[in-house]
Amino acid sequence: MLRVAAYARVSTEKDDQINSLANQRAYFENYIKNRPDWIFAGVYYDEGVTGTQTARRAGFNKMIEACRAGEIDLILTKEVSRFARNTVDALAYTRELRACGVGIIFINDNIDTRDGDGEFRLSIMASVAQEESRKTSERVRWGQRRAMEKGVVFGNNSIYGFTLKNGQLTVNDDEAEIVRLIFYKYVLEGKGSHIIARELSEAGIKPPKTSGDWSGAEVLHILKNEKYIGDLLQKKYITTDYLTHKKVANNGGKIYIRGHHAPIIDREMWDKAREIRESRAVSSNVTRPYGSGVKIVCGCCGASFTPRKSPRKSCGTYTLHMCRTRSRRGKTGCGMRTVNDKSLKTVLEYISDFFAAEFESAAAEAAREIEALTDTDDTSTAHVSEKIKEVSGKRLKMLDGYFSGKITETDRERLTAEYDSELARLAAQLDALENEQKIRTERQRGSDMLEIIKNETRYSDSVYAEIIDKITVYADCLIVKPKYLDLSFRIAYTTRGYKDAYTTTIENCDIVRGEN
């Protein structure tokens, strides 16, 4: 008695497709149950998903897991295009299921993978299905672009302030009032995006996602969206691969239509908001001593710190770093202090000076750590990787020999155990070699770091990014963790003055071993 299951799929959630899916499920269930030599093992199905990928097909993946668990002997499906429109996936799953003792019958294509020429015929039909997917994708993209050029709006009904229906945008009066309020607070009241987000949440106004609180990012998204002045920009992202459906930013070929629909904000307000955004942005010449690889985190709530420009009549515009929780929710969310960018730079200059002064002893210690490691042949990892490929190839050839009848079941079990044992040993050896090489690399980077800060140009963003891993802000100190070294600096400082007279004085610096 064979345990037989079926798989069905439709690519859209339209009524006619859903009806077709229901009919397929009923057909398969009756067909299997009417065979006296078969046991019904269920009908697996997916609706509204593509056939070019298997990752999002819950029903398909559940069926494969059942096969791996030995619960299914045979699968019925309508045709190859329902099973997969990706040739590689179709063949890979067919071979895997065959290794599990599971066959597949494609009814309309008259293919049974248990037959001798089943895989050959399957590869042809899967290639045809994949090519049809490619042509369909091109036709859809061409049609969408022509429609966009005519002003048809694509997407779901999720544009805050508007209602999207039948490709047309109309103003949602209730949400439009909130959009105007955001621009008013930003332009006329001079408030920042995080403060506006906090005030909207405190007022009980639901955010675009309808759950949680407003965020500064959501407010900025509204302030940047050209749809609020009646313009339409489409094709911001494009799908580069019809098989993976991965979207990337479109650097050319975007479609922009000015005065496409009724605006919510006038252009004068929009232009002022843009000018304010640009003036508040942290420019490229603002010192960012933490660098791209350094984190500044809050010692109270654990949130990251972000740089912000703060204009003051008394002392001009300066850059400070603020806890993200405090920025969003105010001091009631987190009361951690802010850190002036000039103070942060002074702290990092102090650490650079320390390393420069202690260069000889620190470099000698780093050299000893490197020498203490076991010598590792740089080619050994490549050699082990090649051995893994070699053994994997032998295992695959053995399986092919088994499926073709040249190798018995007893020999297959014996050889499989031998190959799997060897692969496990090689994998453990490769992990050990890679881990040792990683440690060696980190120690060498520590030595290189010391060499970098020895020279006179150590006061630069690139040097700070190279030597500092994390800065944790506390109410009374900063804890600075260098990269690659098992120590941290606990630094307390005071500030005085403003504008050009603003100074930071390091009051105390303790070196803590093993601090993370």
Image (cartoon, rainbow, N blue to C red):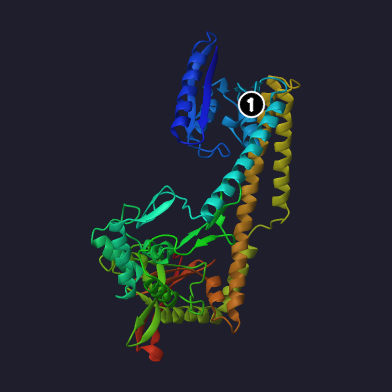
Residue annotated with mark 1? 99
Q: Where residue 493 sits: x, y (%)?
A: 37, 81
Can residue 306 be spotted in the picture? yes
> Foreground: 219 or 266?
266
Count numbered badges in the picture: 1
Q: Residue at the far right: name it.
A: 406
| SS for callout 1 | helix
Vertical order, 443 against 382 (above or below): below
Q: Where residue 511 sits: x, y (%)?
A: 44, 73
The residue lying at 29 percent from left, 66 percent from top is: 181
Residue 418 placement, left or right of 321: right
Q: Where residue 122 sits: x, y (%)?
A: 67, 28
Q: Quadrant of the N terminus?
A: top right
Q: Residue at the far left: name it.
A: 203
Q: Residue at the far bottom: name it.
A: 501
Q: Where residue 225 sits: x, y (%)?
A: 42, 63
Vertical order, 255 against 305 (above or below): above
The residue lying at 52 percent from left, 68 percent from top is: 292
> Foreground: 303 or 192?
192
> Foreground: 329 or 230?
230
Q: Residue at the far top: name it.
A: 36
Amino acid of disc 1: Ala
Can residue 333 be spotted in the picture? no
Vertical order, 480 against 212 (above or below): below
Q: Quadrant of the C terminus?
A: bottom left
How crowded pointer 1 is (Cα within 10 Å; few <14, some 14-19, many 20+) is rated as some
The residue lying at 61 percent from left, 58 percent from top is: 438
Vertical order, 83 against 481 (above or below): above
